Image (cartoon, rainbow, N blue to C red):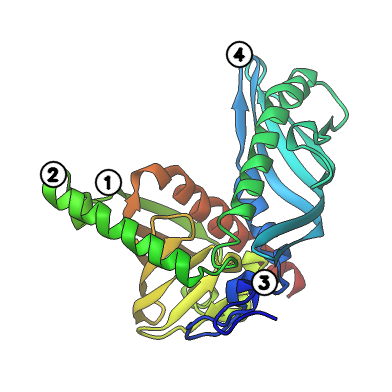
Amino acid sequence: MAKWGQGDPRWIVEEREDGTNVNNWHWTERDATVWSKGKLRELLVGIAMENEAGRCEISELKQVEGEASCSSRKGKLIFFYEWNIKLSWKGTVKESGAKHKGLIEIPNLSEENDVDDTEVNVSKKKGDGDILKDLMKTTGTTKVREALGEYLKALKTEFTAGMILPTRAVTTQELTVERTLAENSLQVQASPVALGVRIPTVALHLTELFDTTVEQLYSIFTVKDLVQKFSKSPAVLEAEKGGKFQMFDGNITGEYVELLTNRKIIMKWRCRNWPEEHYATVALSFVPAPGQTELQLDCKGVPVCKEENTKFCWQKQHFEEIKGLLQLTTQNA
């Protein structure tokens, strides 16, 4: 029998306000399926490759079937994922200007295989253009595997944040380290890190024409059901001043700063992989045009290293998907 005050630390209830899963001993599991679909789309769609013969780009995530999850037991993380992925690619032959399309199939991305050994099959529709297929089978396959590696890295770091709860001992150690670092920084007085880091940013200005009315386009950005349709993922929307929003499985979050019905939307906006607590300011202006609506986007405060990703997010995941939704709505009318 253990003496009073002693015992297996796994069963000792520490002084935690939440009182949850003390010392990470109990089994917990988190479903990563929805998050993974959004992350795979973000990493794979838009991959481009080019050589002297032509240029190719992955244009669409046609299918992603499977599941992913992460479990925690005794302070260890256990990952399970199994995916069957189909992508569309398109390319242009430089000499002739001929355009060709094809498919990429990843039949078994799972924890049983190393990502470098993951099967990636490239095919092309009938006709010429084998030089583009060769480009996709070489450079394209390499870039796809690199993107899959980034997905697995994010699954094991970004998605699992908070699953391993700090114990009192660990928390004390972290506070000691932080205090020591802070004291050293103050003594050196050579770096502004202790006072916060200034993030280099850029501003984006994009315009796009949509074959719809101002009212319809405005509603696509403010009505939950329509946001979920064009983003093909769950969303949370409080379309009012100070209201929060969350889109693309939580990859995009922010807050509405101002809404002028059918005229303008101003919001604080960020991607999940941006520096913590850093937001850009996005202004969407809806300008009527004959038979169309021009959307003017001004985005200030984008981290320099995320400029291209942010452009892609708006042009591909917003504008193109919204046009697809409008086209489908017109066909069904």
Does the residue at mark 1 contact the one at mark 2 (Cβ under 8 Å)? no
Q: Please report contact status of discs 3 and 2: CB closer than 8 Å, yes or no.
A: no
* Earlier residue among tags 1 and 4: 4
Instruction: Check disc 1 and give the amino acid type.
Output: Pro
Q: Percent x, y for residue 243?
A: 41, 83
**Disc 4 residue crowd, few under 14, some 14–19, many 20+, Cα 10 Å:** few
Q: Do the residues labelled 1 and 4 touch (CB within 8 Å)?
A: no
Taking depth in this image into account, of 50 and 37 the one nearest to the observer is 37
Residue 285 in sight in this render:
no
Badge 4 is on which residue? Answer: 52
User: Which label sits in the foreground, 1 or 2?
Assistant: 2
- Any mark on residue 188, and which? 2
**Looking at the picture, how far across and down is residue 111, in whole percent?**
79, 47
Numbered badge on residue 25 = 3
Q: Would you say residue 119 is visible in this rendering?
A: yes
Is mark 1 in CB contact (under 8 Å) with mark 3?
no
Q: Which of 330 and 95 is in front in this view?
A: 95
Badge 2 amino acid: Val
Disc sitting over residue 200 in the figure: 1
Local crowd size for mark 3, using a 10 Å CA cut-off: few (<14), some (14–19), many (≥20): some
